[in-house]
């Protein structure tokens, strides 16, 4: 690895992003033209042509040594352990960095030494799917961390000081299958660091173009739905636990779902006739679906909301009970390409 001074390391975490990775890399190389730095593709053992496409560019390509180590937390940490920048920017393989944002972010950090990381607006391009319409509504009414100013997390990527990350112990917890950015935020904030969102577009993001229920199934299979439980388990006994519980408003909702299930399981023990117990069970089961359908003025959206809560409620239990490994341990990885070698190969092709 090159050990020359480097101002910014941009880490692109990717899994099967063949269709998007070229534009993501090109946007990062363009953004670094004036500020200086490196681009690192952190690949989670893609089975498509992601790595082949990326190898055409002067970027460092690193890959998990084992596909079984895949997680949302593993990708950023994999890239971080191969990075050398004074500042580290993290983004997804289906994002494009907006020109000029890095300059704004670096200037802000230079003026505010108490700030550990900054982000900007994430411009969602996929506004058609039910999942992203629901997310858009939540961000407007219940996610103040997406508004400009001091925030409690930098969801959607951000630029961080390496010094602050080193104080926090590690960049991203490989045990987490989601909520890895929130985990980093609470670790930084528990040390006295602050986070800020700037009033500028930072990245564009298309997101998963999949039917909503197929996306929920994917989130269960990939353990993405387990992130809340994994996060709480990792924070047990740590000073950041209060910040975790304060910031996880959805945890209360998922616990309420578990209570709902528990109450329904007790219905067969109620001192009622068989018909009465059946009626009580049906009423309890239907109530959340009816309430959410009325609230959202749509049966489809109401049913989807409750089903999504159930998937994530089960994920809380599954994630909390999952075994953990040390988040500070090096992730077994392979270096598939160094940027200098790619640049030499490119010059040879055109000489």
Image (tube, helix red, strand yellow):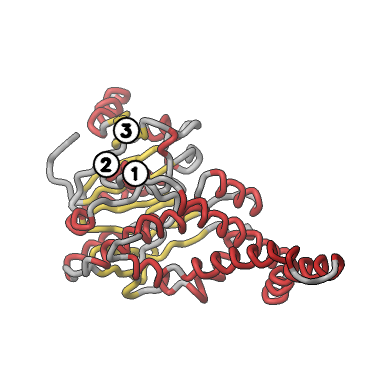
Asked whether residue 98 appears in the rendered view, the answer is no
| Residue farthest right in this picture | 275
Disc 1 target residue? 325
**Quadrant in the picture for the N terminus:** top left
Give yes or no for contact between labels 3 and 2 (Cβ–Cβ under 8 Å). no
Name which of mark 1 and mark 3 comes first in the sequence: 1
How many neighbours does mark 2 have within 10 angstroms: few (below 14), some (14-19), or many (20 or more)? few
Q: Secondary structure at mark 3?
A: strand
Label 1 and label 3: CA atoms lie apart by 16 Å
Which of 64 and 269 lies nearest the eye of the viewer?
269
Q: Which mark is residue 329?
A: 2
Q: Please state if 270 lies on the left or on the right of 168 as rendered.
A: right
Q: Position of residue 230 (x, y in %)?
A: 43, 54
Residue at 17%, 36% (x, y): give it. 2
Asked whether residue 181 appears in the rendered view, the answer is yes
Label 2 and label 1: CA atoms lie apart by 8 Å
Disc 3 target residue? 333
Label 3 and label 2: CA atoms lie apart by 12 Å
Residue at 65%, 59% (x, y): give it. 307
């Amino acid at each position: 690895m090159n050990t020359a001074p480097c101002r910014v390391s941009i880490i692109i975490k990717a899994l099967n992003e063949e269709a998007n990775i070229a534009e993501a890399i090109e946007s990062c190389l363009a953004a670094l033209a004036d500020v200086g730095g490196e681009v690192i593709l952190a690949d989670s053992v893609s089975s498509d042509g992601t790595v082949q496409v990326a190898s055409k560019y002067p970027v460092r390509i690193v890959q998990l040594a084992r596909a079984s180590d895949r997680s949302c937390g593993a990708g950023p940490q994999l890239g971080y352990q191969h990075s050398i920048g004074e500042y580290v920017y993290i983004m997804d393989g289906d994002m494009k960095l907006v020109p000029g944002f890095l300059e704004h972010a670096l200037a802000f950090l230079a003026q505010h030494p108490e700030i550990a990381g900054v982000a900007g607006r994430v411009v969602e391009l996929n506004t058609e799917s039910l999942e992203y319409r629901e997310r858009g509504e939540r961000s407007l009414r219940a996610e103040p961390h997406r508004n400009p100013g001091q925030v409690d997390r930098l969801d959607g990527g951000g630029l961080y000081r390496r010094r602050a990350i080193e104080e926090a112990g590690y960049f991203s917890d490989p045990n987490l299958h989601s909520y890895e950015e929130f985990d980093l935020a609470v670790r930084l904030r528990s040390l006295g660091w602050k986070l800020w969102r700037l009033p500028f577009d930072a990245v564009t993001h298309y997101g998963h173009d999949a039917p909503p229920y197929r996306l929920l199934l994917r989130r269960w299979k990939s353990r993405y739905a387990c992130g809340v439980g994994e996060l709480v388990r990792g924070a047990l006994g740590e000073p950041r636990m209060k910040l975790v519980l304060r910031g996880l408003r959805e945890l209360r909702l998922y616990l309420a779902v578990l209570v709902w299930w528990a109450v329904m399981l007790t219905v067969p023990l109620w001192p009622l006739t068989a018909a009465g117990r059946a009626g009580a069970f049906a009423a309890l089961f239907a109530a959340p679906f009816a309430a959410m359908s009325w609230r959202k003025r749509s049966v489809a959206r109401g049913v989807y909301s409750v089903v999504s809560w159930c998937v994530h409620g089960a994920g809380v239990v599954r994630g909390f009970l999952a075994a953990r490994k040390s988040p500070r341990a090096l992730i077994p990885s392979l270096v598939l390409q160094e940027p200098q070698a790619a640049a030499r190969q490119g010059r040879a092709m055109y000489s």
